[in-house]
Image: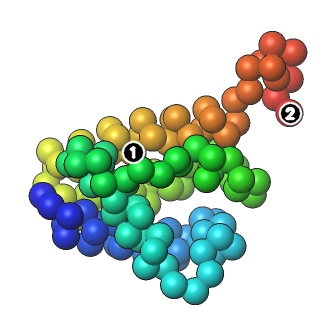
Amino acid sequence: MDRAFIGALVRDFYGRVRADARLGPIFASQIHGDWEPHLEKMTDFWCSVILKNGAYSGRPVPAHLKLKQVREDDFDIWLGCFRDTVEARCPPEVAVVFMERAERIARSLKLAMFFRLDRARNGTTE
C-alpha cells in the first residue's frame, strides 16, 4: 500500500460522498470549484493515519466545528460511504484497518462537535 493506492481510495470515497443526497450538499457548500486541493489534503491525512508518514499537519477538529449544518447521524452516512469504498478497493484485512481508524476518527469528531461537558453537567443537550 502506498500514496497512489490511498489517493485512489480517497478519490473513490469522495465521489461517493459527493453523490450522497445528504452529504453531497454539505461538502459542496464548503468546497467550491476545484476539489483537488481537498483530495490531496485528505490523501495526506489518510497516509498519515495508515502509513504513519507524517504527511498531514492540519487540525481536523476546528475545521469540522465550523460546519453547523452537520448532524451527528451524518457520521453514520460518512462511515457507510467509507465502508463501501474500502470493501470495494481493499483486501479484507486492509479494509478492517481502514474501518477501525475511520470509526475512531468519527467518534472523536462526534465528541468534539456534539458533546459539551457544560451541557452534560446541566442535563441539557442543546
Q: Where is residue 44 in the image (x, y as percent from the top left)?
A: 34, 59
Residue closer to the observer: 84 or 27: 27
Look at mark 1 in the image and give the residue it sits on.
102
Q: Is mark 2 on a helix, strand or loop?
A: loop
Q: What element carries label 1?
A: helix
Mark 2 Cα-neighbour bin, 10 Å: few <14, some 14–19, many ≥20: few
Kindly identify the residue that appears in the image at 49 percent across and 79 percent down. 35
Kindly identify the residue that appears in the image at 51 percent across and 84 percent down. 34
Q: Position of residue 15 (x, y in %)?
A: 43, 75
Figure check: 40 above or below 103: below
Look at mark 2 in the image and give the residue it sits on.
126
Give, as a three-letter code, the residue at label 1.
Ala
Kindly identify the residue that appears in the image at 51 percent across and 35 percent down. 107
Which of the 4 image quarters holds residue 90?
bottom left
Give, as a three-letter code, the residue at label 2.
Glu
Q: Earlier in the sequence, mark 1 or mark 2?
A: 1
Which of the 4 image quarters holds residue 3?
bottom left
Residue closer to the observer: 62 or 74: 62
- Badges 1 and 2: C-beta atoms under 8 Å apart? no
* Residue 85 badge: none
- Image side of residue 67 versus residue 58, left or right: right
Q: Where is residue 126 in the image (x, y as percent from the top left)?
A: 86, 33
Kindly identify the residue that appears in the image at 15 percent across and 61 percent down. 2
- Using the numbered discs, state the Cα–Cα distance from disc 1 to disc 2 in whole angstroms: 27 Å
Asked if residue 75 can be seen in this view, the reply is yes
- Image side of residue 107 versus residue 29, left or right: left
Asked if residue 84 can be seen in this view, the reply is no
Q: Position of residue 113 (x, y in %)?
A: 67, 40
